[in-house]
Image (cartoon, coloured by chain):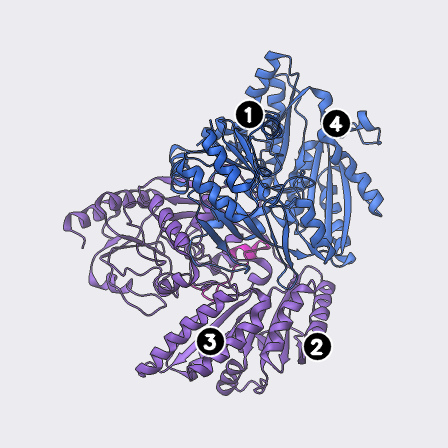
Chain colours: A blue, B purple
Amino acid sequence: MITNLQKKYFLDLLGDENAYFDEAHRVAYCYDATKKRYMPDGVLFPRNEEDVSKILKYCNENKIIIIPRGAGSGFTGGALAHEGGIILAFEKHMNKILEIDMENMVAVVQPGCININLQKEAGKVGLFYPPDPASENYSTIGGNVSENAGGMRAAKYGITKDFVMALRAVLPNGDIIRCGKRTIKDVAGYNTAGILIASEGTLAVITEITLKLIAKPKFKKTAMGVFKSVDDAMRAVYKTMAAGVTPVAMEFLDNLSIRAVENKFNKGLPKEAGAILIADVDGNLEVLLDNDLKVINEVFSKNGCIDFKIAKNEEQSADLWFARRNCSQAITCYGSLKLNEDITVPRSKLPELLSKIYEISKKYDLTIPCFGHTGDGNVHTNVMVNKDNEDEVKRGYAAIEEIFKVTIELGGTLSGEHGIGLSKAPYMKLAFSNAEMELFRTIKKAFDPNNILNPNKMGL
Amino acid sequence: MITNLQKKYFLDLLGDENAYFDEAHRVAYCYDATKKRYMPDGVLFPRNEEDVSKILKYCNENKIIIIPRGAGSGFTGGALAHEGGIILAFEKHMNKILEIDMENMVAVVQPGCININLQKEAGKVGLFYPPDPASENYSTIGGNVSENAGGMRAAKYGITKDFVMALRAVLPNGDIIRCGKRTIKDVAGYNTAGILIASEGTLAVITEITLKLIAKPKFKKTAMGVFKSVDDAMRAVYKTMAAGVTPVAMEFLDNLSIRAVENKFNKGLPKEAGAILIADVDGNLEVLLDNDLKVINEVFSKNGCIDFKIAKNEEQSADLWFARRNCSQAITCYGSLKLNEDITVPRSKLPELLSKIYEISKKYDLTIPCFGHTGDGNVHTNVMVNKDNEDEVKRGYAAIEEIFKVTIELGGTLSGEHGIGLSKAPYMKLAFSNAEMELFRTIKKAFDPNNILNPNKMGL
């Protein structure tokens, strides 16, 4: 609990328009995309890095828990105040694009900057920021960096960490640090940025982010392949990459996902297909894209593709993407509660992963539609249950644990995009040895000896 | 100093063919590319990860300094036993390519694997490992990861850290950890690999490296542009990138470097030119390369290029590259001691950087030929002095310090490729605040509380 004296410190520092301890504000910041709720003790809107530094110094001295928060769109509870504490929200002031440096192809943004705003501004000057998490319309770059967000374009362009060149951050003791430079190469000192990325706001508060931009490719084309079996489709994914083509995205829907979309929207999708793959290719010359699509068609055909379409224009492209864009919503027909995981395996293990998931589905008598970013081995696995059926929910969680075990056995990871937060904390022991967990705790303690910054997340 | 009892431990563990304490071995491992010499107390050749774990555990308990070493080709003394201690050398046993996984486009290697061997083996199956430090023929992947080595191809493909997917490593206490996965996405737990890369062997001993490979581009072409002034050339570099073309490499030689090569080799180089730029482009379609070269030609022409050549075949390409490949050796005509730095600035600051370097050259009355990887802002700055002229050497070091200051002012870094080690340790205070240095020391202490692992490097 926070005392009146402590409240006064924050009100004096930030003004009463930037520090709130009333119920309305606390409720407004008590949730995230997990739909779990934990009431914080207050909400602060820092105006600048100096505010952040003073807040952290004070919280550190007074052992007040502080939780940095972007848009609260996370799927694992990383921004939840599950033990109380103060929410540090960047959306009000520290949400700007500070600079788009065309000469060096670099953007500098504040943590509260919304992903899509950066994509749009960069696009206006012919530049491109590829990371596109599904939450791109509302999630913040600060959150994206803290969770190391991925997205559909990761297959070709990589994920958030591949675009972070430099960070400014405030340590729990209030010290301001910079890490990295506006240069491709920088090997002076420890790669502190490397450890802050994906640290889920547990090591430092990021106050400024310098991102690499690339030249916007002039052309993009979309193709869709229909496969008899999901096994065929999964094999076609990694065979395409190994044939030297790197699609921007290579997404899949399994039969359950296809049927859910078709039943809801009647788009003429092949309801008997084992899976469909949707691929985008891009580049600066149309002939290059046509060549890529030719190779994709060849590889698909050799691997059980029964129908292959290429979109002739943007409208047709949007049509091909319709199923993928709407399947997350459509599959809610299978249950009122979606236990949604974002496991990732080496691409060649996709056929085996899917086959194991369907075995688990049978074993627990549950519907588990799968779709997602097969181009990078990332499968959104949705264990669908009826939230009022206690037994089904229990079986759902047992199925999830088994899916995690299979994923780890196949050399995969608990999370490709969403992070660990609270939701996946119980499963960390499946993925990491005692020595590895101990090292994580050592790192946490080195940065945050008083454990004030987003404590007890990530299973630490 | 190491005791006889301690020697016996290592001999019993590894056998007398893998543990040496005689003068011949100690001398053989007392140097690196800095030409400085520090005698170690012994040299161990671990056979496997278990040996490394036992050695570190024993050294930690007995406070014995241990220095991991690749090829000893580093330019900053990172592998030198400057306070004695035991050299841990991977070249004898732990030097293998363990796997090239074509389906996932991944290689798994031991730390002592020589860079070029990986490039060659990957090439045999149509895959490509881009990082190509100048030392590629002898430097090891373990060393490359520890220093986060770059190379000529960084402009397009990035540096070592961009290819590391996973590591196995041994902590100073002997604990074996894994970090990362054979997946593009993995956000479970702290990004420990991120902090081990570029840590110069001070945090853990890397025992296995999983690297991303890419499909080998089918075509490569080379062009050269001759510029009246170095200022024009430097502007052409970043204008080319901003025009949407990303050459594999974009290298430069200034007038002093051109003249040195021409005087030595008589290749018909333009001795009056302010600078030349040499660029490689690659891709899977010749038309794409031709398009890139057209854009490069246009941008160069608009920025003071007076002669532009495209190589018609591999022989002509080698001819265009001759000057760049031989300039490091040729510039020794300007002095018997080369104070060689690898400063890096944001690309748009290259013109200003070069102009400041020439001012410094005049101020200290020294010859400072420059060449290098302009495509990523990395300039090899060579302060040439006569090693027997004490005053000139002193002026040389003063010039270096001033060059570092200018580099930092321009938003650049002390080191783009070579690391800090011993040589650049005195300059760390120019680049990092007290808070940043303190954080580095905190990280070091968290991993290595007894300070046994490559101590006192990086200015810590």
Q: Amino acid at mark 3?
A: Ser
Q: Main secondary structure of the magenta part?
A: loop
- Labels 1, 2: front one: 1
Q: Chain of mark 4?
A: A
Q: Which mark is residue A194?
A: none
Asked if residue B219 can be seen in this view, the reply is no
Identify the residue at horizontal 51%, vertical 70% (top origin).
Answer: B379
Sequence-wise first label, 1 or 4: 1
Sequence-wise first label, 2 or 3: 2
Task: Locate residue A153, reporting x and y percent.
Answer: 67, 45
Residue that carries the numbered disc 1 in the rendered image: A38
Q: Chain of mark 1?
A: A
Residue B86, magenta (yes or no): no
For the residues labelled 4 and 2, the Cα–Cα distance comes to 55 Å
Q: Are marks 1 and 4 in contact (CB under 8 Å)?
A: no
Q: Are marks 4 and 2 on the same chain?
A: no
Q: Amino acid at mark 1?
A: Tyr
Numbered disc 2: secondary structure: helix
Q: Amino acid at mark 2?
A: Ser
Q: Which mark is residue B301?
A: 2
Numbered disc 3: secondary structure: helix
Residue that carries the numbered disc 3 in the rendered image: B328
User: Furthest residue to the left?
Assistant: B4
- Labels 3, 1: front one: 1
Label 4: how many Cα within 10 Å (few below 14, some 14–19, many 20+): many
| Quarter where residue A320 is shown | top right
